[in-house]
Amino acid sequence: MLKIDELTIRFGNLVAVNHVSLEVPENKIVALIGPNGAGKTTLFNCVSGVYTPNHGEISFNGESIAGKRPYYVHNAGISRTYQIINLFADMSVIDNVIVGMHDVLKSNFFDSLFHTKKHIDEERTGQKKAMDLLKFVNLEEKANHTAGSLPYGEQRRLEIVRALASNPKILLLDEPAAGMNSQEKIVLDAILRETVKRWGLSILLVEHDMDLVMSISDYIYVLSFGNKIAEGTVNEIQHSPEVIEAYLGSD
Amino acid sequence: MKIITQFSRENKKYLAYLPLLIIPFFPLFLKNYQYGIMLLCFAEIYIIATTGLDVVYGYSGQITFATSAFFGIGAYSSQLLHVNFNLPLIITIPMASLIGCIIAMIFAIPVSKLRFAFLSLSTISFGWVVYQLITRSPGGITGDYNGMFVERIVFFENGPDRITQYFYFGLICVILFVGLKLLLVRSRVGRAFLAIKQNVHAAEGMGINVRKYKVYAFGVYGLYAAFAGTLYGHLVGFISPETVAETQSVLFLIMAMFGGLASNWGPLIGATSILLLNDALSHFEQYQLLAYGILLIAFIVFIPDGVVGLIKRTTSRVNEKSEKVNNAEN
C-alpha cells in the first residue's frame, strides 16, 4: 500500500536517510527501529510531507506523494502522531478530535457561515463519532477538558484518536510509548492491536520500546546512521548480528 | 435538586443579557445630546472593524497592522464609485466592502507564508502603500492630503434626525456582522482558524490547508474593515488620509486586545470602552498618544487576555469556591 523506494534526504553534507526502501502492506503493523539519530523521524517527516526528499519515490496506492504538502498527504489517507506531543493544547479534548476530522467533514465556507442543515447534521455526527473515538481510548469522561491539562499518557492516546478521526488507511506513529509507564504501555499495546483490527488500517511505527515493538510488529525495518541495515520478522531481527551490533556496538 | 440549580444557572446566564435590551433606547436618553448618539454610531462602526480583526488575529493568530488601510479602502471606494459611476450608495457600500475583501485575499496569498515579525512588517508596508496611493492619487481623485467630502446617508427625509437613524442602521449592521462572525467561528472553518493559531504544524498535519484558511480569514477581515469604513465615511461626511493612518490600525488592535481576543464579547467591550476613553482623552490631545502607549503596555502586561479573559478568570474562581462550599455542605 505504502511503498518507499530508494529514499534519500540530505541536510547540507549530512545524509540523514540514505537510499532506504521499505513497504507497508495492508492491515499490518510495521515497525521502524534504530538507535537515536538513525533517521527514523526524518523518514516519517518525508512521508507525511514535512520534508521533500532529495531522491527516491514515495508512492501510496500507486500515487506519488513525495514532496506533497502535509495536508494533502493527510487527506490522501496517511495520518500521523508526533514524537513531541503536538496537540491543540488550549482546545477541548473533543475539539481536538473534531479538528482531526477536518477533511472528512464536507460543509463549505457558506455552510459554516450560515449554519445550514448540512452543517448542523455534520456537526452532530462529528460529535458522536468523536465521542466514540474517545471511548475507544478511555477518554470520554475528559471530553470537555482542555487537551493541555491531560496527563502525558492520555495526551499520547488523544493524539492517536485525533489521527484516527480522518479514517486514514495508514497511521504513522512516532514514538507513541515515549514517556509512558509500563501500565500505560500495556494499554497502548491493546489499543494498537484493536485499531488495526477494527479499522482495517496499517500502522508504521517508530518506537524505542523494544518490548512493545517485538510484541505487536508484523515486520521490522532497522535503520542505523541513515542506512537500512536489516529487515525481517520479529524472530529474524532478534537474531540478526547486524542489529545486535548496531545496538550494542562491536568489539 | 441538582436539575433545578442547573436550570437556574442557565437562566441566570440569559438574565445577564437582559440589560442589552436597553441599547435600542439609548437615543431616547440622549435626545438633547446628539454628540452622544454620534459616539454610539462610532462605537458600532469600530465594533464591526474590530470583529473582523478578531477573526484574523484573535482566532487565526495572524497579526495585522493594516486594519485602517482596509477601513480606508472601504470609505474611499464607496464614495469614489458613487461620484464617478453615479451608483447609489446601496450598491456602492456592498461593492466597496467586497473590494476590501478581495484586496485582502489577494494580499494574503503571498503573505500567508509569513509569520510573526515578517507578517507584521508586511501588513505595515501594505498600510503605507495604501496611504501613499490615497495621498498621491492619479488625477487627485481622492483629494490627496486634503481629504474628500463624502455623501451622507439620509434614510428617511422626515422622521428622527439623521444621526439617530444612523444609530439604528448601525445597530442592525452590528447584530448582522457580529452574529455572522459568531456562527462562523463555531463551525468547521472556525475550528480550522483556531487550530492554525494554536499549532500550525499540527493543523497542516491534520489535513487543514493552512494557506487557504489564512486567505479566508483575511477575506473576512478585509470585508468587515472595509464595510466599517464605508459606514464611517457616509456618517461623518468627510474622509482624509488620517482615516488610513497607521496609528488608527494600532487603535483597532488595542480595542481587540483590551476586549479580549477570540471571544464573543471582546470586540464589543473593547471597541466601546477604548472609544469612550479616547473621547475622554481628546481634551488633552497632546497627551493622547502618550496615554495610549502607556495603556497598551499596561494591558499587555496585566491583562493579556483582555476584559473578557479577566471576567472569565474571576468568575471561574468564584464558581470553584462556591462548588467547594457546596461539596463541603453535601
Image (tube, coloured by chain):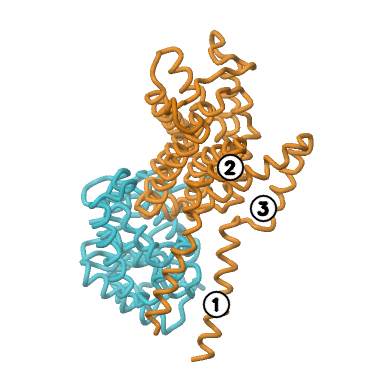
Chain colours: A cyan, B orange
User: Mark 2 — on which chain does it sit?
Assistant: B
> Picture coordinates of residue B266 (x, y %)?
54, 52
* Residue at (39% x, 79% y) in the render: B4
Please state which of the two labelled residues, at mark 3 or mark 1, is closer to the viewer: 1
Q: Is residue B321 above or below residue B31?
A: below
Q: CA distance from mark 3 to mark 1?
A: 26 Å
User: Mark 3 — on which chain does it sit?
Assistant: B
Considering depth in this image, is A149 or A54 the residue closer to the camera?
A149
**Badge 2 is on which residue?**
B30
**Badge 3 is on which residue?**
B300
Under mark 2, the amino acid is Leu
> Picture coordinates of residue B93 (x, y %)?
42, 27
Q: Is residue B311 above or below residue A5?
A: below
**Discs 2 and 1 lie in a common subunit:** yes
Which mark sits nearer the N-terminus, 3 or 1?
A: 3
Instruction: Indicate the quadrant where residue A162 lies.
Output: bottom left
Q: Residues within 10 Å of mark 1 (few under 14, many from 20)?
A: few
Under mark 3, the amino acid is Ile
Q: Residues within 10 Å of mark 3 (few under 14, many from 20)?
A: some
Would residue A242 be seen by someone viewing this image from the given angle? no
With B65 as the anchor, is B178 left or right in this view? left
Under circle 1, the secondary element is helix
Q: CA distance from mark 2 to mark 3?
A: 34 Å
Q: Is residue B1 above or below residue A249?
A: below
The label shown at residue B168 is: none
